[in-house]
Image (spheres, rainbow, N blue to C red):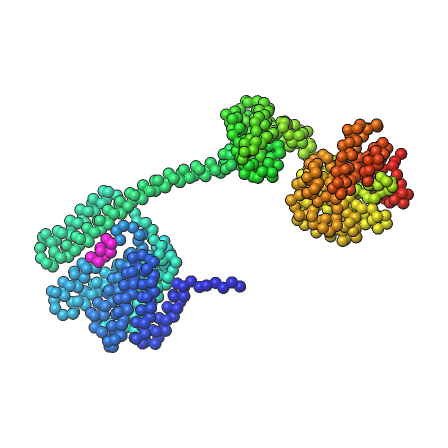
Amino acid sequence: MPIHRIPAWQLALAGGVAAVLALHALGSPYAWPILQAAGTAVLLRAARSHRCGWWLFSAAGAAGTAASLWWALHPGEPPNTPMGLSLAVQYALHAAAAVQFSRRRKPGGAVEAAAVVLTVAMLAWSFVVLPYLGRPGYGMVDDALAGLYALLDLAILGTVLRTAADARRTPGVLVAASGTMLLAAHLYYAGTAAEGARPFLPGGGPHLLMQLWWVLIVAAALHPRAAQPAAADVAPSRTTLAVMYVAAVASPLLPAIARPSVTVVVPALLTAGLCGLLLLRIVVLARLAERRARQAREALQEQQVLQQQLAHRAGHDALTGLANRDLLLEHLGRAVAGDRPYALILCALDGFKEINDTYGHHVGDTVLRQVAERLLRYEREVELVARLGGDEFGFLITSRADAADLAERVVTAVSAAPYAADERRIHLTARAGLADGVPGNDAVLGDADLALRAAKQAGGARTARFDESLRAEQSERARTAAGLRQALTDGSLFMHYQPVVDTASGRATGVEALMRWRRGGELVPPGVFIPIAEQTGLIGALGTRALRLACAQAATWHREHGLYLTVNVSTHQLRDPGFTAAVLEILADTGLPAAALVLEITESVLIDAADTPVLGSLRAHGIRIAIDDFGTGYSSLAYLHALPVDILKIDQSFIRRHEDPPRPQDVSLTRAILELARSQDLLAVAEGVETAGQAELLRDLGCPLVQGYHYGRPVDAAAIDTLMREDAFQPAA
């Protein structure tokens, strides 16, 4: 379990209380100065980083330490007057410190300190010095000290109430509690009707309460919030300042004018000086309040500007400055709740992903900003132009504008001129989907998205308008996707196999595995469910399922007839870091050797996955890689030289050109591909062989392997078993 450190102020509070109680029980007067000196040292250290009040608390601690040391060095019960005078300093300094503690740092701190000093001086002159001068002996001084302590207690009581409500909470409560200890010492002394100074010496109850002052003050000084300022003062009005000025300065001088004697003039002057300082303090506060009010107004204006900026950022795209998806949805919601027809156009860029992949996202961002500039030309015709994310933009139309015409103009504007980025000129086309909305129809965004998807499936660079057939197609796609998820567990997915035949011997050397799906007793064409599997991310699970079924079946054919197995692989699988391990696990589980497995990948997929380590890892384990549909994508000698490939499968579009009789140019093209394969030490397979003439020509050209309907259609495993037993892979009649 983690160890939680106890805060220093809590340790000081607990340890200090324990030490005070222990020393009180022992009753020794000599140990107290040591404990008090340690507390004073802590206060002096805190005063370095804290405010003025802590220096006064330190002074109060030093005064208390000096008094304790003096009386420890002079055994016996001291007289009341010396004891009272020695403790009065600590009381007065605590009151001044508590006032300073509960005020905010601002101009005028020296003025307040002077005001406190003058107040104490005036009280001392009026209640101590004057009686002492007027009547000899200590009896009157004792009475004056009693009055002085009464006033000090009232002052301390005021600071207790003020610091108890301090915003710093714990330090304020501790300071208030320390003042309460000082008050409690007098209350305890008065309540027990004690006489003499002995209760204030070690062993006495008032002495114990006064020593707890040290513990509480030290704990408050060690608290993390001790250095924080208190709440701000409230500035008086100018009228109040004027009234207070007349009353505060003139009133104390009236007695001196009426009776100009030393006993009256000195207190009057001190009081007038005190009032003048207090008035100066008020003026300073007034000016400070005005400045802070001005600062508050400026801060409010800045806050309003910031709120406007934040509101703009919350509703706009940071890259293009257009409205974002959230703002579009907000406006769209108002249009849905309104009473007028409206329309929504979604526009997306054709092939934008390739720009990011080829040139980097910084180039893509540059292009997006330029596209946004072109789209803003139509800002006056629509309610809102927005970027929904990526390369998709939206136009909300609430006017009578022709939405179809606008969609055509947007598509044309995007492709009207190339985009300049990093000294490149990039050509782009766009597609758009349009959906009409009526009040209460909140499905318009989905309808426009379906139209946009239809435009993409139609080849891009065009517009499409939503109609109910698109929703039906979407429902069918969703139904197909749900069926595929179920098919992964219910056994309705199965494999067919098409033989790969050696042209020289006419015997099968391998089979290509092709997945089939039977839904409700009806076969679903691969051209229907494979694209949906790719769109929904199910292609990975389907590919793994197909590979396991095919390898389990082909293991027997390989043992008995030496056949190899070809299985198609998708980009999703090649991008999966765990694909190699999954393939090896399937081979281990089924018993098919790695050399008997060929993974078939289209050219575009191969180029897209060339930067992954998966292909190299698979070949390192003996698995061969074949390019499917060669010649339809990125055919070049450079690719064949750089990519990890073992088998080249010539696309059937080349083979179908071999009419009877074949044209010389088509024969030359096929011959060139075969020569290219031989030069790269690749095994060539011709796909789509459907006629005897095509088979004979390929044999004459030296194509080693062929497959197609001429040699056999894809069939189930049982049919392959029958054909292998009958050795029936000669060209079909």
Residue 398 in picture, x, y percent from top left: 54, 26
Q: Residue at x 34, y 53 (%)?
A: 229
Q: Which residues are magenta?
A: 110-118
Picture coordinates of residue 301 (x, y %)?
Answer: 37, 38
Q: Is residue 253 left or right of residue 295?
A: left
Between residue 594 and residue 422, name the one nearer to us: 422
In-image side of 370 versus 212 (left or right): right
Instruction: Work out which residue is located at the far front of the displayed protein and give it.
Output: 679
Residue 144 counted in the magenta span: no
The answer to which image quadrant residue 367 occupies is top right
Q: Answer left or right for 42 relative to 588.
A: left
* Residue 464 vertical placement versus 630 (above, below): above
Q: Is residue 453 left or right of residue 198?
A: right
Q: In this rendering, does residue 129 appear at all?
A: yes
Say which of 630 and 35 sits in front: 630
User: Residue 116 at x, y = what percent?
Assistant: 23, 57
Q: Which of the 4 quarters of the picture holds residue 219?
A: bottom left
